[in-house]
Amino acid sequence: MTTLTKRATVYLKPGLHRALRLKSVETARSLSDIVNEAVQVSLAEDAEDLAAFDERSNEPMISYEAALKELKRHGKI
């Protein structure tokens, strides 16, 4: 099965590029595979964060001032 891919130009800092090339050699994987996996992981984390925000959207809001007062009242600060 052939996977369709899109070409993109990405500029990396020299140290990151070197580390990526070394990881590529060590793991016998292409730079593209490593970068694709990192991007997928990052996007999955974003999706999880958005889902968590949605789940908590109906929780009551508390002001910063009220939060500080509550912490002080309970001896936390």
Image (cartoon, grey):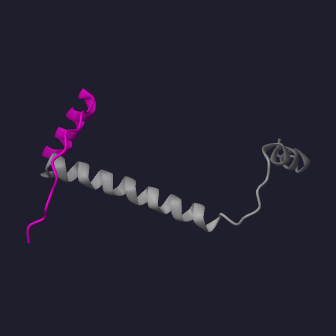
Q: What residue is drawn where x is 59% and y is 60%?
A: 53
- Vertical placement of 27 versus 14: above or below? below
Residue at screen point 59% across, 65% down:
54
Q: Quadrant of the N terminus?
A: bottom left
Q: Measured from the top left, where is residue 74 in percent x and y?
A: 88, 51
Taking the spot 52% from the left edge, 58% from the top edge, the residue there is: 49
Q: What range is drawn magenta here? A: 1-26
On-image quarter of the C terminus: top right
Relative depth, front residue between 9 and 66: 9
Q: Position of residue 67 (x, y in %)?
A: 81, 48
Judge by depth and name the residue closer to the eye, 56 or 20: 56
Residue at 19% over, 39% down: 9
Assess whether residue 11 is covered by the magenta stretch. Answer: yes
In the image, residue 25 lies in the stretch drawn in magenta = yes
Q: Residue furthest left?
A: 2
Q: Is residue 36 left or right of residue 41?
A: left
